[in-house]
C-alpha cells in the first residue's frame, strides 16, 4: 500500500495562486492591504461610534469624518508598509491625491450604503457602516494597486 505524500498548506496556496495567475508578491500585498484595511475599519468604526454615541453627531456628518480620518490613516500605513517595495515613479503627494480620489470613491459607496441600509431598510447604523466599509475595501485595493502605486 502506497502512502501519499503530505500536502502542505503552502503548496495548496501556491497551486491556487499559480492557477489564478497571481504572484506571491501581489498576494503578499493584498494580505498587507487587508491588514491595513482592518486597522482602517477600527479607526472608522471607533470614530463613528464616538461621534454618534458620545458626541451625538448625526450619521450624515459622523460618517464622512470617520471615513476621512481612516483614509488618511490607511494611506500612511499602505505607503510605508504595503506598497513600500514597489518601484513607483509617482511622487508622494501625487500618490496621496490619487489614493484620496480612489478611496473617496469607495468612501462615497460606503456612505451611500450606510444611508440606504439605515434609512430605507432600518438596519443598525454600526452594521450598515461595516457593510459599506467591506464593499469599499475591494474598490480600494484594485484601483489603488493599479493606479496609486502603479509600477
Image: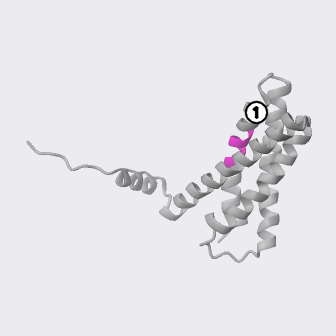
Q: Give me the residue at 79% from left, 66% from top.
A: 96
Please tell me whether mark 1 sits on a helix, a strand or a loop.
helix
The quadrant where residue 14 appears = bottom left
The quadrant where residue 118 appears = top right
Q: What crowding class fits label 1: few (fewer than 14 Cα within 10 Å), some (14-19), or many (20 or more)?
A: some
* 131, above or below 17, in the image: above
Q: Give me the residue at 58% from left, 56% from top.
A: 30
Q: How is the image coloured?
A: one colour
Spot the residue most to the front.
Answer: 54
Image x and y of residue 132, in percent = 74, 39
Q: Give me the residue at 43% from left, 57% from top.
A: 18
Task: Pick the quarter of the image with the C terminus.
Answer: bottom right
Q: Is residue 125 magenta?
A: no
Q: Main secondary structure of the magenta part?
A: helix
Image x and y of residue 10, in percent = 37, 54
Magenta range is 132-138
* 87, above or below 146, in the image: below
Q: Is residue 98 visible?
A: yes
Query: Would residue 76 appear left or right of 12 to someone viewing this image?
Result: right
Name the foreground residue: 143 vs 80: 80
Task: Pick the quarter of the image with the N terminus.
Answer: top left
Image x and y of residue 120, in percent = 84, 23
Q: Which residue is mark 1?
A: 126
Spot the residue most to the left.
Answer: 1
* 59, above or below 16, in the image: above
Image x and y of residue 49, in percent = 79, 38
Amino acid at each position: 500500500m502506497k502512502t501519499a505524500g503530505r500536502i502542505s498548506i503552502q503548496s495548496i496556496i501556491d497551486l491556487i495562486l499559480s492557477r489564478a495567475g497571481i504572484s506571491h508578491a501581489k498576494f503578499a500585498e493584498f494580505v498587507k492591504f487587508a491588514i491595513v484595511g482592518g486597522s482602517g475599519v477600527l479607526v472608522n468604526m471607533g470614530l463613528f461610534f464616538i461621534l454618534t454615541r458620545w458626541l451625538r453627531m448625526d450619521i450624515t456628518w459622523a460618517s464622512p469624518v470617520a471615513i476621512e480620518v481612516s483614509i488618511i490613516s490607511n494611506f500612511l500605513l499602505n505607503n510605508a508598509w504595503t506598497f513600500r517595495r514597489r518601484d513607483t515613479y509617482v511622487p508622494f503627494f501625487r500618490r496621496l491625491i490619487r489614493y484620496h480620489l480612489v478611496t473617496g470613491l469607495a468612501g462615497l459607496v460606503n456612505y451611500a450604503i450606510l444611508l440606504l441600509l439605515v434609512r430605507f431598510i432600518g438596519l443598525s447604523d454600526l452594521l450598515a457602516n461595516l457593510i459599506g466599509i467591506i464593499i469599499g475595501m475591494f474598490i480600494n485595493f484594485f484601483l489603488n494597486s493599479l493606479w496609486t502605486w502603479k509600477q
